[in-house]
Amino acid sequence: ERLYDICDYYDAESLLTGDERRVLGRLRDFLDREAKPLLADYWERGEFPSQLARPLIDLDLMEPAELTGTSGTNNAPARGIYQGFRIFELARTDASLATWYTAQAGLFRTAIRVGASEEQQREWMPRVIDFSLKGVFSLTEPESGSDIAGGLSTTADRDGDDWVLHGAKRWIGGASTADVLAVFARDVADGQVKAFLVDRQAAGVNLEKIHRKTSLRMMQNAHITLDGVRVPESMRLHNVNSFKDVAAMLRAMRSDVAWIATGIQAGAFEAALRYVRGRQQFGRPLGSFQLVQEKLARMLGNLTASLSLVVRLTEQQARGVYRDQDSALAKMQSCLAMRETVALARELAGGNGITLESDVARFHADAEAVYSYEGTHEINALIVGRALTGESAFTR
Ligand code: FAD
């Protein structure tokens, strides 16, 4: 029996093992039973349903499919199709849940895998995987988003065995419940970007929740200020020596976001299909009209193209063929498709498509944040453009 009978049109799930499908099935059951009834309420209140965190962690989502090797020359962590489908399954239910999961399983884990020395990894990685060391990825700044490579202005000043950090970070997902913040800062001595694990409770760290969001309302984002925060050298990620090492992390994370964008399309498509089968106008189900069927076909085309793209990207990544432009292209293209798919879903649900009573409204609103994070459309397009022409259109 297939897990995805409608939204995985070309049967990509046949690439999964029986064990992997069983874990995904358990995840599906949990999400249907425990998560779905909470989503509209928590979204409206702008709060994360924290009671879901522990049971989700206990589903052992990071294992057993953890691929321990690194691939190719880029030191990008290898990712399995199964890992992608876990993100897909979460996003198919809710984009904030998927973002919450990838903050730890994608962003933070990648920061440790790529940035930490072997010794540091031995100490931290088991705790990252079982969520007993919760961390977030603090790169973006109030004045620097797309141009963070050149514009990063948080500073790190060496003082004996410590470093002293000054600056601010913005949009940091999951910071309020994290134990540590992986903070990227510029070394005042050599001008290079370094990374530090900062205790969230350390003196000089201040977190403010970003309020009044209209997208991904359940996911908590923070504005962080760092005012003379002391971090011991032992908490510096020893393998981060320049922005190149940060780029290796982003390369891996963009693939996760492409899976999120694909999962959102699956959720929106399924909700819209249910709706047009159930609702009658002109004495017939909406689904019987030609113009409605064309929209359904377009949505399925977008979703299937996105899923094929991320599956192939993930296979290439596991083989070690994995360049900046590969994940940038997948992030860009899946998000373009997502924007059209969720808009069509919203359209098909008519007026009901703008209330939280219908799932499509949540997918429609949440897609906007996913469209912009992990590199906007333009920045990912320019990464592809640089590879095609040999000319960088976005350096300072
Ligand atoms: P800007 O860089 O100011 O861009 C504004 C617009 O200008 C965009 O359309 C952009 O494409 C365009 N633009 C910029 N430069 C060019 C150019 N050269 N050519 C053409 N167009 C250009 N960051 C983290 O570090 N950690 C997180 O956990 C995190 N989580 C996030 C969660 C959410 C919900 C959101 C919304 C953001 C998150 N971010 C996080 C930050 C995110 O990565 C940035 O928002 C993103 O990189 C864009 O930066 P910006 O918002 O400053 O936009």
Image: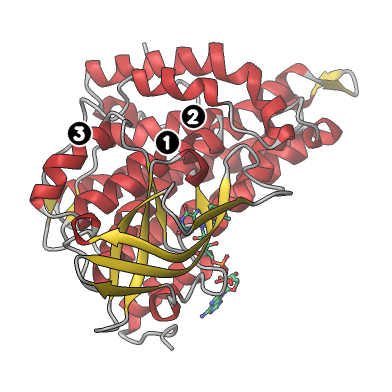
Q: Which residue is mark 1?
A: 101
Q: Earlier in the sequence, mark 3 or mark 1?
A: 1
Q: Amino acid at mark 3?
A: Pro
Residue 68 vs 252, above or below: the answer is above
Q: Quadrant of ligand 1?
A: bottom right
Q: Amino acid at mark 1?
A: Tyr
Q: CA distance from mark 3 to mark 2?
A: 34 Å
Q: Earlier in the sequence, mark 3 or mark 2?
A: 2
Q: Quadrant of residue 32?
A: top right
Residue 248 vs 96, above or below: the answer is below
For the N terminus, which image quadrant? top left
Q: Which residue is mark 2?
A: 7
Q: Amino acid at mark 2?
A: Cys
Q: Position of residue 29 (x, y in %)?
A: 46, 12
Q: What residue is drawn where x is 64% and y is 34%?
A: 47
Residue 372 vs 357, above or below: the answer is below
Residue nearest the viewer, comparing 190 with 125: 190
One can see residue 8 in this view: no
Q: Which residue is mark 3?
A: 126
Mark 3 vs mark 2: in front = 3
